Amino acid sequence: MKIALMDSGNGLLPTAAAVRRLRPDADLVLSSDPDGMPWGPRTPDDVTAHALEVARAAAAHAPEALIVACNTASVHALPALRAELEPAIPVIGTVPAIKPAAAAGGPVAIWATPATTGSPYQRDLIERFAHGVDVTGVPCPGLADAVQEADDAAIDAAIAAAARVTPRDIRAVVLGCTHYELVGERISAALQQPGAPALVLYGSAEAVAAQALRRIGAEPAPAAAPTGGLQVILSGRPAGLPAVALAYEEGRLLAQSGDGAVLAARG
């Protein structure tokens, strides 16, 4: 079994790690675009062009499915990716987990990039899945970039700034950018109010990984032998796992090859 994942950068790590936990025997292909990131400020047509190049690089390795582990690419490029790759390669997009968060009741905050917060795409999801629920969109300028670089000081500053404009009575936070799932514990710590019920974070990685398996007719097998390999493509070039990925638990999990050895990391 071979599953490919794509993103502009390290935002694919949470979903890739989720796939690895569900199927330790699956080969993974990670295709990202360090030369072209960030994608958020780009026009929709430009995002689509970059996403197609990254997807083609992954598709050249003949995966059974391609996960678009990026909210921005899922918003703008999913139709083009599916038109080019399906039905030969199923394409699975990433949608913020607004529906399950709203189903649990509010108030809910959606942390996302400034471009996504207030976008027609996010407004539509709120209207469809959170009608009547108290939902606050919280822009998080600089957070994805800080996570991409594993810059602890910048991560803390961006989280603190977003926390200051997040209502204190929220009970759930939707992580509307895949990069944010890498620092979920730090987001929870910044938002948890003393004496309040435990804050619940809603990411997309686990659900998207499970959906990818369903699309190819595979069952979860977390007890399978950890024989899955890893191929990394950076802006179309074969590479090792970037060293910055090892700053995160998800990256360290993926860095273990099938024989248990740590794969080469490059800066």
Image (cartoon, grey):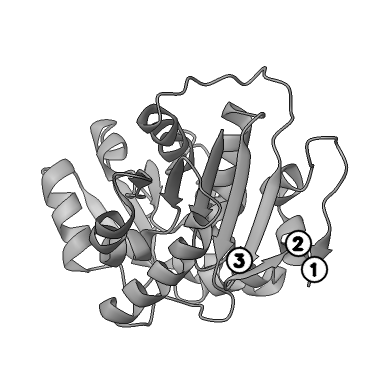
Residue type pointed to by label 1: Arg
Q: Left or right of 169: which side holds 229?
A: right
Q: Name the mark nearer the viewer: 3 or 2.
A: 2
**Secondary structure type for disc 2:** loop
Residue 135: percent from left, percent from top: 24, 51
The spot of residue 97 in percent (x, y) is 33, 43
Where does the N terminus fall, quadrant-wise? Answer: top right
Label 2, residues with CA under 10 Å away: few <14, some 14-19, many ≥20: some
Q: Who is closer to the viewer here, 7 or 162?
A: 7
Q: Earlier in the sequence, mark 3 or mark 2?
A: 3
Report if the CB atoms under discs 1 and 2 are less than 8 Å apart.
yes
Q: Which amino acid does the dot numbered 3 rest on?
A: Val
Q: Mark 3 highlights which residue? A: 147
The three-letter code of the residue at mark 2 reads Gly
SS category of the residue bearing label 1: strand
User: On the image, numbered disc 2 is attached to which residue?
Assistant: 240
For the C terminus, the quadrant is bottom right
Q: Where in the figure is residue 250, as x and y percent of width and height? A: 67, 46
Work out whether residue 240 can be spotted: yes
Of label 1 and label 3, which has the lower sequence position?
3
Q: Earlier in the sequence, mark 1 or mark 2?
A: 2
Locate residue 53: give its quadrant. bottom left
Residue drawn 18% across the image and 51% down it: 126
